Image: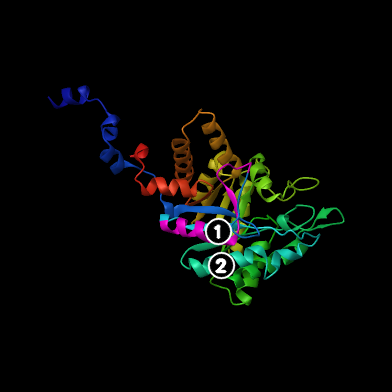
Amino acid sequence: AFDRFKMDLVYRPRRLRRTAPIRGLVRETELSPRQLIYPLFVTEGKSVRDHIDSMPGQFRLSTDELVRECEELYALGVGAVNLFGYSEEKDELATKSYDSDGLVQRAIRTIKSAVPDLCVQTDVALDPYTTHGHDGLVIDGEIVNDESVEVLCKMALSHAEAGADWIAPSDMMDGRIGAIRNALDVQGFSQVGILAYSAKYASSFYGPFRGALQSAPKSGNKKTYQMDPANIREALKEIALDLEEGADVVMIKPALCYLDVISRVREAFDAPVAAYNVSGEYAMVVAAAEKGWVDRDSAMMEMLLSIRRAGADMILTYFAKDAAALLRADYGSFR
């Protein structure tokens, strides 16, 4: 009788998908608001919510509006915000990037005063502050490394002095993580973390973001410092170097076309891994939803779950606020 039972046995995986509670019990990947980081664009002025044409639903916010946004995000349980600023006064040496009274520095102080428990991260790169729009300094037609790192250290220190919790260098200059870590420690900011853009690829998906900050390079491209999309071993090397230099968290950018990189990094390193769900990825979903081709919320949640499933511990995403609201409302499609 036992042999006959074995012959008749049929495996039925659908038993574990039969009801919402059962699906919840066996779910392998979870998404939480605390794993989301919301990128925010800061602008000058008061009561300003300047719509970003290339990123529907996103805004350039004056500091007072920024505080209101951060209060809402904190109430939703979003893990952190990442600030992007600029200066109307640009020069060849990005001197306004480390101005103690600069836009981002003021925004940090304002947010930490109003919402002290919210984790505030800041982008560290020179492109919004230079006349040429590159992440490093350009000298004699060359994007120079070590001179750029010196300015990046000054910029990072000015953010730490203003009260930033994490510094997020996105420039991809060699050796900048070690230099920034040393600069922070020497000046008494050993508690400030570094979220390193360790594997930032030269991607076509940054276009809407560059429109938001008006930071596209005036000439040339960023391929001598951002990574070749064809390479994965190089990403592992970059991440190993950043961890050796003192990075607390490493990041892969963009996310969707680089899920394999996220997965390999997760397997190779015992360190927190972030991924950036970039502006072009956001814009594709929003545009398709506006056409009625996809359901915006379902596509958003599926996209974020795929990044988590690949191995990201945290996700920078323009969907953070909307996703957190849905998660707080116990979003049914994934139950």
| Rendering coords of residue 8 (x, y %) | 20, 22
According to the picture, the residue beneath numbered tag 1 turns out to be: 66
Query: Which residue is pictured at 70% across the width and 67% down the height?
Result: 98
Q: Residue 5 carries which label?
A: none
Residue occupying the far left of the picture:
1
Residue 269 in view of the camera: no
| Visible residue check, residue 185 | yes
Crowding at label 2, few (<14), some or many (≥20) Cα neighbours within 10 Å? some
Where disc 2 sits, the SS reads helix
Residue at the farthest right position: 140
Q: Quadrant of the N terminus?
A: top left
Structural crowding at the residue carrying mark 1, measured as other residues with C-alpha within 10 Å and reported as few (<14), some (14–19) or many (≥20): many
Which one is in front, 11 or 255? Answer: 255
Q: Is residue 67 magenta?
A: yes
Q: Which of 181 and 77 is in front in this view?
A: 77
Front-lying residue, 310 or 96: 96
Can you give x and y, in whole percent of width and height, for residue 191 in the image?
53, 71
Disc on res. 110: 2
Q: Is mark 1 on a helix, strand or loop?
A: helix
Residue 13 on image: x %, y %:
29, 31
| Up-down relation of residue 317 to residue 95 (above or below) | above
Which span of residues is magenta-colored?
53-75
